[in-house]
């Protein structure tokens, strides 16, 4: 196996070895760098704002494990909590007090949720939330939006049908057409389609699932008119509004994205919320919650079945609870948001300086940018162009020690561990990268 001058196994050698035994060499497709090309970096360890790969190369990390690492890697309080929990036992298959503490800590920040069920991944949480909505309403129809990703449950691997009244088509092999016949895909921020869907099928809609700030289209906000009308139509037709906050939850604000909309739309709240990533602090943990009235449909109380061997895992709950306690401290989000805004404002200023159209946006510790004159409002606009330009920029930044998300349609994340010097170094690298690539 090839090694580099310091006798480290190279990323390329590890990738070759991985591909022999793991499909595509990765355990989640986006990690394979297929969208941007090149060799994925095999991470040996991470600390604070940095990841170090198998060749000893250090990167300023703007993925943060796709959102969870809001404190940065190896926060002492989190590390200590996980180490202590591990000595007490890895898993019991029985309830623990810490599950109650974590759920209480989440509910304290999200007034729309009265009860919560802990699970092990965002996919599991979103899938369970849909089953709960269908069970609670007695309806089958699920509405989602193009460009929003809610994990890989069959019902969600679907693209828009030819016409509005037609239902989705599977985006993945292995998903029978019958499974997605109850899934309708609309265009994000498209009021007209929303009105038409409810006019045609409002009484059959069990739930509408939406990323309130769509991080799987890089960074696209739901417009106020769209979100206002979505809430009204769901209420009017008895459909449940499901906020998928797996990425935005406890990342864009302590109260998650719903707290931002609640400030802008009087009395606004979703009916069901899905969380993940930050609430696990980097360990496998996610959750879904709603009013007591909706949650009572869940087993063992009600007829909607949902279960999990490692749900509420004692080590994962220790990691999540320690993380939430840190981010709930006064001033945490103000400082994080200011740092993230300085990065995005700086990128746009450099774009103007070098004559490259670059539009960006951010909220809390989450950001996105596009090689475009203005911010796209839906998936088609996001994917309309700039992929090749982004990919060149991605590699020019990676070569300069800055690790961005390896796909144009992914969001970026800043942590509390990113220093002002890291932001400055990132902007310097961006200036050189934009000039070079
Ligand atoms: P997981 O099953 O990957 O924990 O969560 C699925 C999920 C659900 N909802 C939203 C809004 C999400 O962003 C995700 C997962 N996000 C991707 C990043 N775009 C995870 C990265 C990956 O797939 O490896």
Image (tube, rainbow, N blue to C red):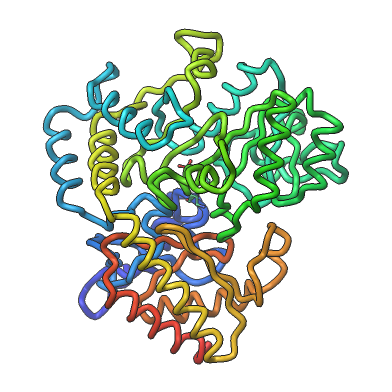
Which of 362 and 53 lies nearest the eye of the viewer? Answer: 362
Q: Position of residue 389 (x, y in %)?
A: 60, 78
164 to the left or right of 252: right
211 to the left or right of 76: right
Seen at 61% across and 42% down, the residue is 210
Quadrant assignment, res 116: top left
Seen at 68% across and 15% down, the residue is 138
Q: Position of residue 371 (x, y in %)?
A: 61, 76
Picture mark count: 0
Which of 330 and 163 lies nearest the eye of the viewer? Answer: 330
Q: Position of residue 254 (x, y in %)?
A: 38, 46
Whether residue 23 is situated above or below residue 375 in the rendered picture:
above
129 to the left or right of 397: right
Seen at 69% across and 57% down, the residue is 378
In the rendered image, is residue 277 in sight? Answer: no
For the N terminus, the quadrant is bottom left
Q: Position of residue 408 (x, y in %)?
A: 57, 66
In the rendered image, is residue 419 in sight? Answer: yes
Which of 226 and 47 lies nearest the eye of the viewer? Answer: 226
Quadrant assignment, res 64: bottom left
Which of 30 and 323 lies nearest the eye of the viewer? Answer: 323
């Amino acid at each position: 196996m090839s090694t580099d001058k310091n006798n480290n196994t190279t990323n390329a050698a590890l990738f070759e070895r991985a591909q022999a035994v793991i499909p595509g060499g990765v355990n989640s497709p986006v990690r394979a760098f297929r969208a941007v090309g090149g060799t994925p970096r095999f991470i040996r360890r991470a600390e604070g704002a940095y990841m170090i790969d198998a060749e000893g190369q250090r990167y300023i990390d703007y993925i943060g494990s796709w959102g969870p690492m809001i404190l940065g890697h190896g926060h002492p309080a989190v590390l200590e909590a996980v180490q202590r929990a591990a000595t007490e036992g890895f898993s019991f298959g029985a309830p623990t007090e810490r599950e109650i503490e974590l759920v209480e800590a989440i509910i304290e920040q999200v007034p729309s949720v009265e009860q919560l069920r802990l699970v092990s991944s965002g996919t599991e949480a979103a899938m369970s939330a849909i089953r709960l909505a269908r069970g609670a309403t007695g309806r089958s129809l699920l509405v989602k939006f193009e460009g929003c990703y809610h994990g890989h449950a069959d019902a969600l691997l679907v693209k828009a049908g030819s016409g509005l009244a037609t239902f989705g088509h599977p985006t993945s092999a292995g998903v029978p057409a019958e499974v997605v016949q109850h899934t309708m895909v609309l265009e994000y921020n498209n009021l007209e389609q929303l009105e038409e869907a409810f006019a045609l099928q409002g009484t059959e809609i069990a739930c509408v699932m939406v990323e309130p700030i769509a991080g799987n289209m890089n960074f696209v906000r739901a417009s106020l008119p769209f979100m206002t009308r979505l809430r009204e139509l769901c209420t009017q037709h008895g459909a449940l509004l499901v906020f998928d906050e797996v990425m935005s939850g406890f990342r864009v604000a302590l109260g998650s994205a719903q707290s931002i909309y609640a400030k802008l739309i009087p009395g606004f709240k979703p009916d069901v919320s899905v969380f993940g990533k930050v609430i696990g602090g980097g360990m496998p943990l996610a959750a879904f919650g709603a009013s007591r009235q909706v949650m009572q449909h869940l087993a063992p109380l009600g007829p909607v079945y949902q279960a999990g061997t490692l749900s509420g895992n004692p080590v994962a709950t220790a990691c999540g609870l320690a993380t939430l306690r840190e981010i709930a401290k006064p001033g945490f989000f103000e400082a994080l948001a200011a740092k993230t805004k300085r990065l995005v404002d700086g990128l746009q200023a450099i774009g103007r300086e070098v004559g490259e159209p670059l539009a960006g946006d951010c909220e809390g510790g989450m950001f996105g940018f596009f090689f475009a004159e203005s911010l796209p409002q839906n998936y088609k606009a996001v994917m309309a162009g700039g992929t090749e330009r982004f990919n060149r920029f991605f590699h020019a930044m990676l070569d300069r020690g800055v690790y961005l998300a390896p796909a144009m349609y992914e969001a970026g994340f800043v942590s509390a561990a990113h220093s002002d010097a890291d932001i400055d170094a990132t902007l310097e690298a961006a200036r050189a990268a934009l000039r070079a690539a």
